[in-house]
Image (cartoon, rainbow, N blue to C red):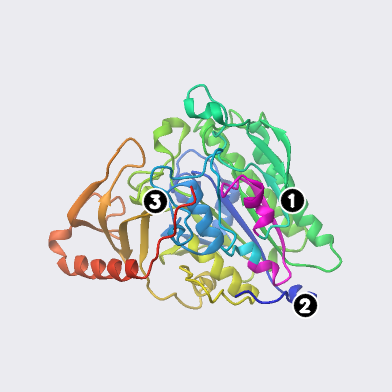
Amino acid sequence: MLVPAAPASNAADKPNFVVIFCDDLGYGDLGCYGHPTIRTPQLDRMAAEGVRFTDFYSAASVCTPSRAALLTGRLPIRGGMQGQTRRVLFPDSERGLPADEITLAEALVTAGYATACIGKWHLGHRHEYLPLRHGFEHYFGIPYSNDMRPNSRNPQSSRWPPLPLIRDDTTIETEPDQRLLTERYTDAAITFIRQQKAEPDGRPFFLYLAHTMPHVPIFASDRFAGKSARGLYGDVVETIDWSTGEILRTLREMGLAENTLVLFTSDNGPWLLQRQAGGSAGLLREGKGSSWEGGMRVPCIAVWPGRIPRGVDRHAVASTLDIFPTALALAGVPLPNDRAIDGQDLSPVLFGNGEVPERPFFYYRGGELMAVRRGPWKMHFKTQAGYAQPQPDVHDPPLLFHLGHDPGEQYNVAKDHPEAIAELTRVAQEHQSGVKPVEPQY
């Protein structure tokens, strides 16, 4: 279970954590990941001054379960944060992240951390499920996706309320100007950082900045609109790049950069169905909603001056599940001992002084295990496009791809490698025997 709060004198020596989590940003949407026209100088600089992961995954291919996984270090199926008919929470959903799930914020509070959630929550909109019930001391943002509002194109939405903007537990606006959301989130994040620096007890902090964008509908303020060669989608991503630069600049100016781990990533792949309003998975196959690589492999950059080596690519398989145990290890907080934690401490990979043991990665779609990866091999039991494919294709024998040779998953080599099929089948069976699904909360 969790440990008592750390004394203030010890807490002051602990690192700060800033996690920047984009919505539907694709693997190929940043300059440092190969996009030819979207300009991301701040994120490119972050990659040049830190670590860029090439094989980093979100634990789910859609919004709600990916957020639950990041904050708990657990596969969503273990806490009921998955669904088949409804794959995410909606404004008429009754439930949310269960109270007995331990979030990263709750765990860090026990070690004396100040905590803030800014941006999109999407783990339950009712009072009992909002961030202040899950370890965050401050909240500013929207409770679910920005398209979940009354919309003439979606008959279901007629039952939904106007989109709320919430501060702590109180709705302060409805239908906020979405052109300004990224900038308002950035201002709130900077204010939180400055407030922690000004506090006399010098508490360390955890800032979780979960951007609304580039989830559709996309908007850019006058300051950024029309500036990108990629059109409006590029404007939106370049706004997020600016935001990241402002946060990093604030940390440097406040003398906090050398004691702060900043991690930038995305909740899932690009929403390809949105065409030019959606992003790019680069060379990867498919996008949001699918268990093909483009649905779950995402950009990830980490920086910590003086601790993380500069300009290094890491090819280790890692995921958002690893953020929870990594942060707790760095903060000196024991992992909860009463539940399965699916992530691992990435400190050796981040600092370049070792490797994490090779472990499999499991690709879930709702409550179904669709595929498994170990090392370069990925095996699909079932495949399904993110959207517009009602039923999955079942593969017997399974499909097999060597992701080192074929990251785009174009060439099925199952016939040539029966030993890999046998090993991955064993790994999947062993995993499933240890997973007890919880009733979906949706």
Identify the residue position indicated by label 2 in the image: 7
> Is 386 located above or below residue 155 in the figure?
below
Answer with mark 2 or mark 3, whichever residue precedes in sequence.
Answer: 2
> Is 114 located above or below residue 37 in the figure?
below
| Foreground label between 3 and 1 | 3
- Does the magenta portion include 2? no
One can see residue 305 in this view: no
Amino acid under label 1? Answer: Ile
Residue 441 at what x, y percent from top left? 49, 51
> Is residue 56 found left or right of 160 in the rendered image?
left
Q: Quadrant of residue 46?
A: bottom right
Q: Which residues are magenta?
A: 107-134
Identify the residue position indicated by label 1 in the image: 190
Residue 301 at what x, y percent from top left? 53, 58
Answer with mark 1 or mark 2, whichever residue precedes in sequence.
Answer: 2
| Foreground label between 2 and 3 | 3
Amino acid under label 3? Answer: Gly
Front in this rendered view, residue 157 or 320: 157
Amino acid under label 2? Answer: Pro
Identify the residue position indicated by label 3 in the image: 366
Q: Residue at x 51, y 70 (%)?
A: 346
Under tag 2, what secondary structure?
loop
Under tag 1, what secondary structure?
helix
Q: Residue at x 33, y 50 (%)?
A: 292
- Disc 1 packing (10 Å; few <14; some 14–19; many ≥20): many
